[in-house]
Amino acid sequence: MISEIDTSGSSGDFFELLKRSGYKLQGSANDSLKLERDQVPQGTTVLAFHYKGGVLVAGDRRATAGNAIMYERCDKVIPIDDYSLMAIAGVPATAFEMARVLSHNFEYFRRSQLQPLSAEGKIRALSNLLKENMGMAIQGVGAVSPIFATYDLRSEKPAIYFYDLLGAQFQILTHTATGSGSPVIRGIMEHEDLWGEQPLAGRDFKQAAVLAIRLLETAAQFDSATGQARPDDNIFPIIAKIDHTGYEYIPEADMEELYRSSMKRTQ
């Protein structure tokens, strides 16, 4: 945790500051640990798409290790700053560390340069972290496949970026999903966008949230690593949006009613 930041003579490069302080993102596994893939918790499934006025980001709550369910309340949609969210699929420990570094990076730049980091700078920062994590990703014990959503205050437009395990970034103009349950729902999202009652970008936030819940429930039907909602235990997907006002989560208090209305069959 960085509590005090010395900005004297700073260029705003937070990664250079980390190097000088001796910090290094876990780049390779310790051979003596002999980590196996089925011993490392994994988080799935997350998705994002453009709706009318902004971007919706959502994820289920389950974390697994091999065929074991490790946790049913994993938060996979993480705020980075007031206008940015990162949705994670992969190893939560690595992803949460990346999220903390990104959050400090954005704040350090804002304080040292007296202006917020540009959307382009934010996008590249996550790419750099993924490249540093390449060793763990290749070994299969620290892989992270994130979705980054942000609102660009300069262009006044929301944006979604998908990253592969090695840090390559791809701007998404419509919709995307990642994680073990994503193959099941990618086709549904494409069908809804092309032949649904209206394109995804034309739907209001409630319509978008209903679709997100149904997509995650569908993924859970076919993928054991994706957790279903459990109303009796007050476990529901995480759904957030980003627009010109910043990010906002659907409160847990509102999720049960939204979930039950989402599960009603249409005539």
Image (spheres, rainbow, N blue to C red):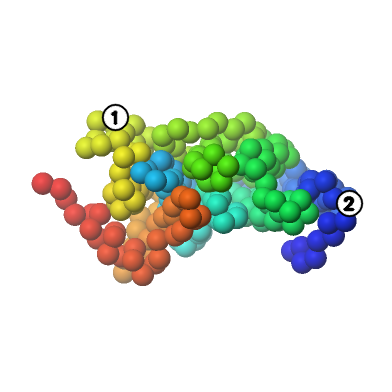
Helix, strand or loop at disc 1? helix
Q: Residues within 10 Å of mark 1 (few under 14, many from 20)?
A: few
- The type of residue carrying mark 2 is Gly
Q: Residues within 10 Å of mark 2 (few under 14, many from 20)?
A: few
- Give percent across and percent down for residue 1: 74, 64
Q: Residue furthest left?
A: 267
- Give percent across and percent down for residue 131: 70, 36
Q: Closer to the camera: disc 1 or disc 2?
A: 2
Which residue matches tag 1? 194
- The type of residue carrying mark 1 is Leu
Helix, strand or loop at disc 2? loop
- Give percent across and percent down for residue 147: 53, 42
- Above or below: residue 127 compared with residue 4: above
Q: In the figure, is residue 42 to the left or right of 216?
A: right
Cα distance in 3D space between marks 1 and 2: 52 Å
Which dot marks residue 90? none
- Above or below: residue 248 compared with residue 88: below
Q: In the figure, is residue 180 to the left or right of 218?
A: right
Identify the residue shown where x is 35% and y is 58%. Answer: 229
- Give percent across and percent down for residue 64: 50, 53
Which residue matches tag 2? 9
Identify the residue shown where x is 44% and y is 55%. Answer: 240
Identify the residue shown where x is 83% and y is 56%. Answer: 7
